[in-house]
Amino acid sequence: MAEPRSRHPDLNAIGMAAVFSALAHPARARIVESLLTRDDWTAGNCASFNLPLSRSSLTHHLRVMSDAGLVIQRDHGNRCEVVLRKEELDARFPGLLDLVRQGARERAGAR
Amino acid sequence: MAEPRSRHPDLNAIGMAAVFSALAHPARARIVESLLTRDDWTAGNCASFNLPLSRSSLTHHLRVMSDAGLVIQRDHGNRCEVVLRKEELDARFPGLLDLVRQGARERAGAR
DNA sequence: ACATAGGTAAGGACTTCCCCATACCTACGC
DNA sequence: GCGTAGGTATGGGGAAGTCCTTACCTATGT
């Protein structure tokens, strides 16, 4: 169990436009932000993001994010685990996650 | 002459999602890259970007970029000047332009 | 004055994206 | 076994994005 799925691309095959696209949608940005704040384990089950979306829409966004190399999904029996590819992203796109963090901070109210 | 147009927002009113959206399109990323490499003056007339687009499509993309706070357009008689809001962007979204530069480098062939 | 060239605006065709409802499938608890 | 709950796949409706053509406007050059 806990097998990662296929469709988790090599980050070297991902271009800047693809990650920008993936992060351009508020819901997806929120998911990344959410994974960033759970700093030590950076994971969560799908329902824990508290987004105003149906389950199928959430599935859709997670698929887009997986295709863009942002996250990895692992099946855990019934649930699924979403893991941010933090170190890989930091290495491949330095500064990107800092921008996401900044967006989170600003949305949180301070400005 | 050389009046900046209206519709050039305060960068504090621009969110992370908006800039990511604006940079997510290859043509627009190319324009920013192009403006970045002309490092000392960061400007150019509209036709100098060498994009496979009609003039009206280019106008459209420049408008999107203006609305997203990436560039300022000034009318110079017949031509228009496009200026990247470099310092402002660096202050508001630190690291963002570095990512664009990286995208340009990678597209240029090296990797 | 005239033609030309750069830029814009409006409209339509086409595609892509976003979201939902539905149906289904698999694990878990009883 | 049965119900329930989390996740996925599919399809459709609607919105948004992209690109072009056409028409127009203004400045430049002759």
Image: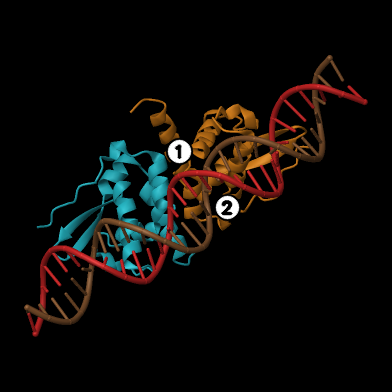
Chain colours: A cyan, B orange, C red, D brown
Where on the picture, by quarter, is residue A44? bottom left
Asked whether, in this view, residue D26 is left or right of residue A44, the answer is: right
Left or right of B63? Residue C30 is left
A75 above or below B85?
A: below
Question: Which callout, 2 or 1, points at the residue further toward the start of the chain?
Answer: 2
Q: Looking at the figure, which quarter contains the N terminus of chain A? A: bottom left
Residue A75, horizontal then vertical, whole percent: 17, 58
* Residue that mark 2 sits on: B11
Label disc, if present, on residue B100 of the rendered structure: 1
Disc 1 marks a residue whose amino acid type is: Val
Chain of the residue where label 2 is placed in the rendered structure:
B
Chain under callout 1:
B
**What residue do we see at 67% from left, 51% from top?**
B7
Q: Is residue B99 above or below residue B111?
A: below
- Image vertical order of residue D3 relative to residue B84, above or below: below
Seen in the picture, residue D13 relative to B87 is either above or below; the reply is: below
- Residue B111: x, y in percent? 33, 28
Identity, as a three-letter code, of the amino acid under mark 2: Leu
